[in-house]
Image: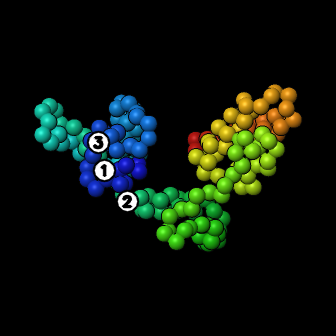
Amino acid sequence: MQVMWAADSWLMVRDIRDRMDYAPVAYTTVSKVTSILYEKDLLTRRLDDRAGKPGPAAWWYRAARPINEHIGALIARLMDYSPDPEAALAYALSARRRTSTGQPRDSEPEATAADQAAGAEPSKRALHALTTNELNARRRELMRAIKGISADAPMQADLRRWLDQVLAEEKDRARTTDV
């Protein structure tokens, strides 16, 4: 979706794939995800000729709405679950951490897996407060740390306990999204 929100025009699947800012992904994967996003009304599409290229027409896509409208709709939907939406929104606004440029600030530095294996304290942030990406990074760090130290090391039990907590949080989030 980041590619679509950044685009100032309609894009074909190949254009989307070419603009993605991470490891190469198969064309068919991007095509499938694009179709799913269209089915979820996150993208709009139109069938049109491929400019300057022979052959059949192709699907052209663009974001159904700007990112701020999308995020606003998500927040509004979440507010429906709060017994006191105004208080929840006030808390969210006060908890929001921004830099002077208005961009989200990087999360607080967390202890690395190597630090944890050496006996450093884990992050003070609660697992439920981590983003999905931060939670995935935590899981990978813990798995690397567990592999990197002796099975009978005293820290091994702590690392496994922390990993179990991370896995439980991931499972809980997956269950929540399935509802």
Secondary-structure class at tag 3: helix
Give the x, y percent position of residue 5: 37, 54
Q: CA distance from mark 3 to mark 1?
A: 11 Å
Q: Earlier in the sequence, mark 3 or mark 1?
A: 3
Quadrant where the C terminus sits is top right
Q: Which mark is residue 15?
A: 3
Whether residue 120 is visible to the viewer of this picture, yes or no, is yes
- Characterize the local packing of mark 1: few (<14), some (14-19) or many (20 or more) Cα atoms within 10 angstroms: many
- Residue labelled with disc 2: 66
- Characterize the local packing of mark 3: few (<14), some (14-19) or many (20 or more) Cα atoms within 10 angstroms: some
* Residue in the picture at 79% in, 47% down: 120
Between residues 62 and 24, which one lies in front from this camera angle? 24
Q: CA distance from mark 1 to mark 2?
A: 10 Å
Q: Amino acid at mark 1?
A: Arg
Whether residue 63 is visible to the viewer of this picture, yes or no, is no
Secondary-structure class at tag 2: loop
Q: Residue furthest top?
A: 151
* Residue in the picture at 82% in, 44% down: 119
